[in-house]
Image (tube, helix red, strand yellow):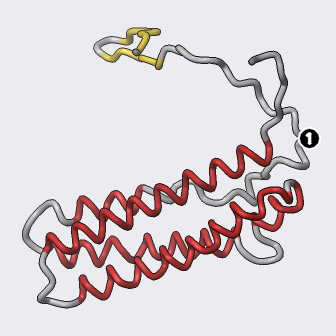
Amino acid sequence: MRFTIGVRGQQRWEVPMVTGPIQQPSVAPTSARPTPARRPRANLLPGPHALSRALDTEPYWRERLLRRLGPVRQEFAEHVRLTEGPAGRYAELLHHAPRLQHGVTRLVREHSVIVAALDALRQAAERPGVAAEELRRATEHLVWALARHRQRGADLLWQAYQTDLGGED
């Protein structure tokens, strides 16, 4: 449900109406929260969605897919660089919330799976005999894996830094 908050000429400004509980801001000390320089990049998905659109139109769909795959691979490599290792985001997360070790291990494992899927899609797109439908399925699987990985990472951050303020059953 949307609620109109203003009209300017022909343009209406609308905002979603709040229908559920309002979450309180975290009361974790600011030193425990992720700093802007240390946050993993939030725009991990626009590139993968462009991959799906690359297969929607003829001609040159294969070239378009390969061209759009490059930036997604670079973006994901940057994500891995920022999150893994002793100075990465996951190490900081585990320092703050060691109980999340299993979730961090899962995310690290997903990195190698996603990199392999990116490589497999590139190799398949470079082969001339591969049908568009097969590439479409592989692309959809990759986009789904990236979205799931992003959600799991967000869930883990929420678990690490959320504070139960009580008062609800």
Residue 20 quadrant: top right
Q: Position of residue 127 (x, y in %)?
A: 20, 90
Residue 8 location, quadrant: top left
- Quadrant of the drawing holding the N terminus: top left
Tell me the residue at 40%/84% (across/down): 119
**What x and y, as percent, mark residue 123?**
31, 88
Q: Quadrant of the C terminus?
A: top right
Residue drawn 77% across the image and 64% down it = 101
Q: Work out whether 163 lies above or below 16.
A: below
Q: Which residue occupies the extreme left position in the image?
A: 59
Q: Which residue is mark 1?
A: 29
Instruction: Tell whether 35 sits left or right of 20.
Output: right
Tag 1 secondary structure: loop
Query: Which residue is at 53% across, 71% downward?
Result: 76
x 24%, y 67%: residue: 137
- The picture quadrant where one finds residue 97 is bottom right
Which residue appears farthest toward the front when viewing the image? 169
Residue 26 vertical position relative to residue 158 in the rendered view, above or below: above
Q: In the image, residue 106 lies at what x, y percent?
A: 64, 67
Q: Is residue 150 left or right of residue 139?
A: right
